[in-house]
Every structure is written in C-alpha cells, then in structure tokens.
Amino acid sequence: MATHKGMRKNFIEWILPLTASVSLVFLLGIACTLVAASLPVFKSVTLQGFLFGKEWIPTAETPSLGIWSLMIASLYVTLGAIIFALPLGLGSAVYIAELASPTVKEVLKPVMEILAGIPSVVFGFFGIVFVAPIVQRLFHLDTGLCGFTAAIILGIIVIPTVASISEDAVSAISKDLRNASYALGANRWETIIKAVLPAAKSGIFTSIILGISRALGETMTVLMVAGGAVKIPTGLFVPMRPITATIAGEMGETVVGSPHYHALFAMGLVLFIINIIFNLVADRFQKGKRNV
Amino acid sequence: MFKKAMDKFKKMDRRTAAQDAGFLLLKLCVLTVILALGTLILFITLKGFKVVNFEFITQSPTDGMVHGGIFPAILGTFLLSIGALIFALPTGVLTAVWLTEYADNQRFVRLVRIGINSLAGVPSIVFGLFGMMFFVKFMQFGVCLLSGALVLGILILPTIIGASEEALLTVPKAFKEASLALGATRWETMYKVILPNSVSGIITGIILSVGRAAGETAPILMTAATFYTARLPNSVFSKVMALPYHIYALMTEGSRKGQTEIAYGTALVLLLLVLAINSVAIFIRIRARRERKW
C-alpha cells in the first residue's frame, strides 16, 4: 500500500502544469489580440507609412496615421529619464551595497520599495501640481508640461528598478575580488570603481535595459505631464506626446472599428514587441553572468 | 629620501581625497532619492490634509464632483484589487509550486519562465488594450468590475509567482528530505512542510501586488473605470469608480473650480493606502526574518 501512496497523484498535482502555463497562454493571447486588432489599419496605411510617417492626424477625413513623431517623443522622454535615473539609481545601489551599515541598509531598502510602490498616477499628479510650475519658472517656458518634466518624473519612477537590480549585481561580487584589489594597495573607492563595478557590468546593463523598458511603457505619467502636442519634438523642453499617452488619451474618443482605432492597437503592438525584445536581451545578459 | 616620502604621502592624500569625494557623491545620490520621495509625500500630505476628513472618505460625490466625498472610488479600488487577487493568488502560488518542486521538462520550464518574464515587462496600457478587446468586447463582459479585475489579475500574476517562488526556495532542503523520509508523498510534503514554512514570504508578495493593483490606472481606463456613477456597484458587471482613475479624471476632464482640491484629497487617500499596504508587507517580512528558526 505504501508504494501506491507514493505513486498516486493528488488532483492538484495534475492541474499544476495547467496553472503554470496560464502566464504563457495570456502572453500569447495578448500577442494574438494585438495582431488581430492591428492588421486592419494596414488597409489605410502601409507599414512604412505607419512607422515612419511624420503626420498624425487621425480624425481628418482621410486620416494621416504616421507614428514617427510619437515614437520620437517616446524616445526623448525615455532617454531623458534613464540619463536622470542611471547615476542616481546606480549611485544609491553602490552606496547600499558597499558603504551603508546594516542598520542604514535596513532603512534604505524599504525606502526604495516604497518609492517603487507609489502609483504612477500619483507621480503624474505631483508632476502637474509641483514639478511643472518649477520647471516653467526655471527655464522660462510657455508651459511646464513638457518632455523635460516628464523625463524627470519618469526618472524618479525608474530609479528603484535600476537601483534594486544593480544592487543585486554589486552585492553578488565575491569577497575574493575585493580582497585581491585591497592586497594590491587599492583603497575602497578604487576597488569599487576599478574592480567591483566592471565585474558587475552585466547586471548593471540589465538594470539599464529593464529601466528603459519600464520608462517606455509608463503611461499615466507621460499622459498627464508631457504636454500632449503632436509634432516631431524639437528638443526636450517642448510639449510632446509619447506612444503610451496617445493610446490612453485617444482610445476613449475614437470610433470603434475606424482606422484610428486600429492604429492605436498597432501602436500597442509596437510597444509590446519592443518590450519583449528588451526583456529577452536582459534575460540573455543575466544568463551570461550566471555562466561565468 | 625625505622628498620621496613626501611625494608618496601627497599621492596617498590625493587618492584619499578622491575616495572622500566619491563617497560624498554616492551619499548625495541616496539623499537626492530620499529628498524626492520625501518632497512628494510631504507636499501631497500637506495639500491633501485640508480636504480629507471623515465625510470625504465615507460620502459619495455631490454637485458635479466638486463637493462631497470619494467613497465609491475607495470601494471600487478595494473591489478591483480583491477581484484581481481572487484570480491571481491561486494561479500564481500553484505556478510557483510547480516551478520549484514538480517541473521536470526543462524545455517547458524555460518556455514558462520566458512567458512569466515577458508578461512582467508588458506595459500596463497594453494590458488595457488586451482587456478591452478580450474581456470587454470578445467575452462581452462590458466595461465592468469583472473585466478590470481580470486584467489587473493578469498584471500582478508575475509578481505573485516571483515572490512565492522565492519564498518556497528559502525552505531548507533538509525539511523536505526529512518529510519524504517519513513516508510523506510529494504533495503532503509540499502542503504540510514547505508551504507552511514559506507562508510569510508568500503573504509579503501578495500584499505588495495588491498595492500594485490598487494603484494601476492605465489597465482599468478602458475596462472598468468610470468618472461618476450614481449607484454603488451591485454586481460584477457594474462600472466602478476607482481612486487612481478619479485623480486622472479630475485633472483632465472638466475645469470646474475645486476639482484640483478634491484631486489632492484623492491623491492623499491613494498614497496613504498604498504606503500602508507596503509598510505592512515590509513589516511582515522583517518580523518573519527575525523569527526564522533556521
């Protein structure tokens, strides 16, 4: 009887592989849904015209459905955000991993988690009522709701992502490497800069990739703060409308089934594909690190 | 001889100065982050404090949103988060159980992991698009609580899986081996030994993901949320108000005087809610770590 007991599977054990595939099923479901809802747009515009067309006038009689200006806007705010978040996030990560006493660490790590937990709509609200007026006055702009303000807020949102992944990478570097560096006469700072950080570079690179992917997909903040102007941005200090903001802002007003409607789904598909690529690259980098 | 020593000393000094400057820089980074977080919390608290009182959190809005409270939005956010959890909790924990203890087909495991990681990276607005197309239109649930809760459930699934897996993996192998040696089956070992010993870690992950679900706006924008309903939700097919959407709508729709004030109050309520949820999770984790016997 005892052997039988070992063989028999509980019914939950039977359904385990099914529950495990739920994530995969939904990922494929999202992909299929997006593709199906996007395809009709290519009756009105070519793929090239869609991706590189410079005009986005979706409500005209013969709508112009080029998302180039929106993609450039996304690029501006995302790069701005990562330029802002990388030094602060990486600096904080190195401080937490290398310098902070255990007590300070116990405080700083939850601080990062709390920052990561604040909803993006609250950041967007804070951007409108607090950051935008300051940016407007500081740079003498017509409006503080511009790419620069969006980049700052996005940067703050991305800091915990960059910091936590970099911190894991820095903490994972073995003591031997540090001791070898000290034995050669290097002080702590030189050890961090010349031994620890280079050794942790694949983890740091992963943190940057995931940070960029996070900033690119962030919706509410850019919708509220970036200003919303539809033209190719001439710099960071003008109002602009990134892809995510366009989808969220225009979906409520579009006619279901119109080319505009399908174009919004096609934008979602573009975002989805970019994010999958970034995640696969990050995944590969982490794997590379593990093999070493 | 003396000069050489002086040179060496000076060189040393420069290196120490570089170190001091470097450490100062790192401290400044941390301080900037803390300052940003502090400013946000303080500013919203000070401004929102004037608006939030007992009526504000227990009454419905009146007079076209500029008076009264935000109770329906609080209730809506609560229901959406709970609904998301009802879907994601069993699915997420069971996936983690499978990944840590049962998975033997390495190809399938890799596929599942890629699925989970990719799902975690999908932008929230894309979840919204999917929910609108699949739950609202295809399944014909309409814009309602059920559609929103399901979308949020899929969104937090990777978080719950990740946290549960981490918690399950912290249980020492010796526990499992002892249980199996006593003649327990794999499932009995999982159910009576591994799960009970990792429950605090799983709970931490669940609470954090509830906080995430409560604060998301983009996914419910097209699947569940409405700026105003006269009635409280009476079924899963009702449209609901929600705190994050309410803040957005107050700032972008209409331009009546007083909307910004209500938005400050709503932002404070949402902020406090999320901070409280996260603090509870962090507290449980710290206590569990102290009490751990292995």
Image: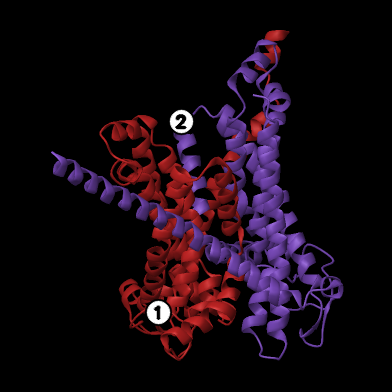
Q: Quadrant of residue B241?
A: bottom right
The dot on residue B106 is 2
User: Can you say whether B70 is above or below B201 in the image?
Assistant: below
Q: Chain of mark 1?
A: A
Q: Is residue B218 visible?
A: no
Q: Nearer the viewer, residue A66 or A183?
A: A183
Image position of A232 (left or right of B212)? left
Q: Nearer the viewer, residue B198 or B241?
A: B198
Q: Residue at x 70, y 16 (%)?
A: B184
Are discs 1 and 2 less than 8 Å apart at CB?
no
> Helix or strand or loop: what does disc 2 sit on?
helix
Colour red belongs to chain: A
Q: Identify the amino acid type marked 2.
A: Gln
Q: Residue at x 36, y 82 (%)?
A: A233
Q: Residues within 10 Å of mark 1 (few under 14, many from 20)?
A: some
The dot on residue A249 is none
User: Can you say whether B70 is above or below A275 in the image?
Assistant: below
Q: What's the distance in space between the residues labelled 1 and 2, CA to CA?
A: 45 Å
